[in-house]
Image: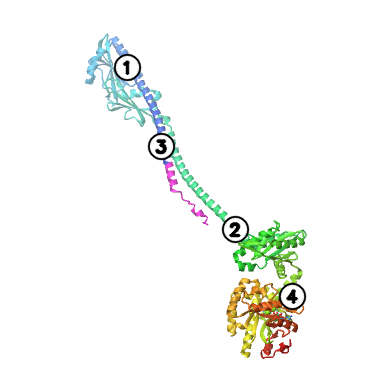
Amino acid sequence: MSQPSLQSVNHRIPRWALLVGLLVLLTGVFASWTLHRLQLETEQVAVKRYLDRVSEFVRSDILTSTMEHAQAQSRMALRLGQNSLVDEPGWRLEASAFQSHYPYYRGLAVVDTDFRVLWLEHNGPVELAENEIVVVDPLYRQRLREALDTGELVVTRTAWLPDRQPGIFFFQPILQDDQPLGYLLAVMVVPQAIDRMLPVFYRDDVVIQVVSRGMEVFPLAETAQPPRIGPQSRFVLDADDDGVGFEFLVHLSPTAIDQLTTPLPFFVLGMGVLLSILLAIGGVLAISAGRQAHVLAEANQRLTAEVRDREQAERELEYLAIHDPLTGLPNRTGITRHLERTLDGFDPARAQLGVLFLDLDQFKDINDTLGHQLGDSLLSQIPDRLMTVLREQDFVGRHGGDEFLIVVMRDSREQIESLAGRLLRSLDDGFEVGDHRLFISASIGIAFCPEGGQTVSELIQNADTALFRAKHAGRNQHALFTRELFGQVQHRLNLSRDIRQALDAEEFSLVYQPIIGLEDFSLRGLEALLRWQHRDGYAIPPSEFIRIAEETGIIARLSEYAMTRALSDLADWQKRFGETPFLAVNISGAQIRQVDFAEQISVLLHQHRIDPRKLHLEITEEVLIENLVRNRKSLERLNGIGVQIVVDDFGIGYSSLAYLKNFPVSVVKIDRSFVRDLTRDGEDQAITRTICSLAADLGMLTVAEGVETPEQLALLRQYHCNFSQGFLFSRPIAAHAVEELLSGRLPWADLCPESL
Ligand code: C2E
Ligand code: MG
Ligand code: MG
């Protein structure tokens, strides 16, 4: 599973986003610039149009004014002609009036046809004086002469007046009945004229420059001129019709431009650029935020998926932690949890709570003979079968191996007991496992709450104790946990503790019971039997402590002690007496299950220099059948090193001798129960006889144990039983007493075979 990759969220702005931002910026700036240009142009066109219009007004106003004073002059000349140049004072009056009306005329003069000044009226410096000849530009002489014929006004080009002002001269011919008398000469100061003639209305709006023959005639250099900016309009006024006139260059004044133009184009440009920058930054941020959001969303998604996976894994782990993978049932932990919950809300007054400990009988055999796979397959079918008699709310868990734990609530204990019976019967049909049809039974121990325990562990433990009882009572049944059973359990526990302490305190010892050859009553063997003299003074029978030692596992140490002790005793006797009888040692199921048991025996035999054939290992029929496959291998190994195998307590375990032939068994020890009633019970006789003859046929020797009477002995001899062991000959005796026997003093000597 990958790490949550929040680290992969890149906080830098991606390059392409920057490019997009730049593009947006450029486009925005370009668009703003274009818009700005467009607006500017539109504005300039409007301004130019306005300027042209103003310029047109200016032109027409100047023309009109010029026409007006030209006509005034013409009228004055007409009047001079009519008066035949006699009314000098009248003219002077008229001339003054003209000048005050048109102040930009520097002077007026009446000139005769030879250009001599007759009369002069002026209000500023002029290069004229009365009775002097006017200096006339030769260019105009001809035209002036012709004008005397046509009466046309002649306007000269600009010339400099004495005060360095540009001026022009108007020559109006004075005629009397078509007879030329002279000219009315008017000297006009151009800048003043233009200044006066400019329409008042537009005066502030325009800045005018007038150029004539390369000379700036308006405004005059000395006067402060406003800057000429913006568009310009031009027109030419040609007063003398020589093709070169006054060129008027009209500009708008800054104030007019201010009024006519708006800052809008620049505002648009500024705003456009600003907007573009904002848009670009916004775009970049949006893209990177979007990308960030995308990456974050992805990371989030991955995180969510990871969290989901982990939760799932945790759920699975949790499930695995409390479930058994084979059957899918709750395991030991699951069982504990369920029981804890159940006990939590349990009220014994309302219902009965039963904990049923179910264990399959001899499941080990199935595992050993058919293999674990088929064993597992069988195990996995058990829950379904149990469910056929259970209710949905009942609980089944696998406690381990072939053990199942069932928790039920019913109205009465009888109901729970009858359910246990039905559970056992539900298995009766057998199971299809591979190609096999397997039949298996089970045993159930039941503990009721609260008598059988108030806590989870007590209930399970006590149900297990009851199960043990059911097993011992012969399997395929159920047993209840009772107070009495509890007492037994306590006793067992105490005993188990005592066994450990006794082993350390060397309270155990061995006694030997002679085994007699029935042909000649010779001492053929010695069976080593454990004895426990409790430190409190009383002896505890092996039947009791051996079973408990087996149940609690201490049997391994106990058996080891017995085996070592017996072998060292035998080695002792060998040293002292040379030839000795065989030594029979009882072997527990726990020992035979040890993988290296044969090796251990082999080492011990070697250590004590004992011929393996001298050692008889007694294994009860029950133990033998319990672990068929494993025992077979173990026994073969033991047989391989040369020790003899004895089947102890034979006859009660339902196995046949024919079956035993599959094992390397050399001696069969007939169970004491058959011998006990031998003289009274015909059936026991038949069984004993059959065992003896069949064993002989199979090449096995027979031992009868528990022989107490000569009658029993006689019958056994009759059946050709090989050996006998019992109180009739000798009780189990201490090791030192064995020495007596070995030295040849046999207490049963008076039991002469011939006398039987
Ligand atoms: P077992 O191996 O069948 O031993 C024979 C039992 O029969 C002995 O009981 C013996 O005292 C008793 N017995 C012998 N002759 C007579 C008789 O004529 N009449 C009666 N009533 N009993 C007779 P013990 O010593 O009490 O042993 C009981 C069982 O304890 C033994 O049965 C054996 O299975 C087990 N046992 C004893 N010692 C050991 C041991 O060292 N290891 C193991 N694993 N089991 C042992
Ligand atoms: Mg025995
Ligand atoms: Mg026995």
Q: Nearer the viewer, residue 553 or 733?
A: 733
Which of marks 3 and 1 precedes in the sequence? Answer: 3
Q: Which residues are magenta?
A: 1-24
Mark 2 sits on what residue? 316
Q: Nearer the viewer, residue 161 or 288?
A: 288
C-alpha separation, residue under disc 4 versus residue under disc 3: 129 Å
Residue 491: horizontal and vertical position, in percent? 73, 74
Which of marks 2 and 1 precedes in the sequence? Answer: 1
Which mark is in front, 1 or 2? 2
Mark 1 sits on what residue? 70
Q: Amino acid at mark 4?
A: Glu
Cβ–Cβ under 8 Å for marks 4 and 2: no
Residue 690: horizontal and vertical position, in percent? 69, 76
C-alpha separation, residue under disc 3 versus residue under disc 2: 67 Å
Residue 683 circle label: 4
Q: Image check: 694 left or right of 129?
A: right
Q: Quadrant of residue 418?
A: bottom right
C-alpha separation, residue under disc 1 versus residue under disc 2: 119 Å
Which of marks 4 and 1 precedes in the sequence? Answer: 1
Which mark is in front, 1 or 3? 3
Queried on whether the Cβ of the residue with tag 3 lies below 8 angstroms from ligand 1, the answer reads no
Few, some or many residues within 10 Å of mark 2 (<14, 14–19, 20+):
few
Which mark is in front, 3 or 2? 2
Q: Is residue 552 visible?
A: no
Few, some or many residues within 10 Å of mark 3 (<14, 14–19, 20+):
some
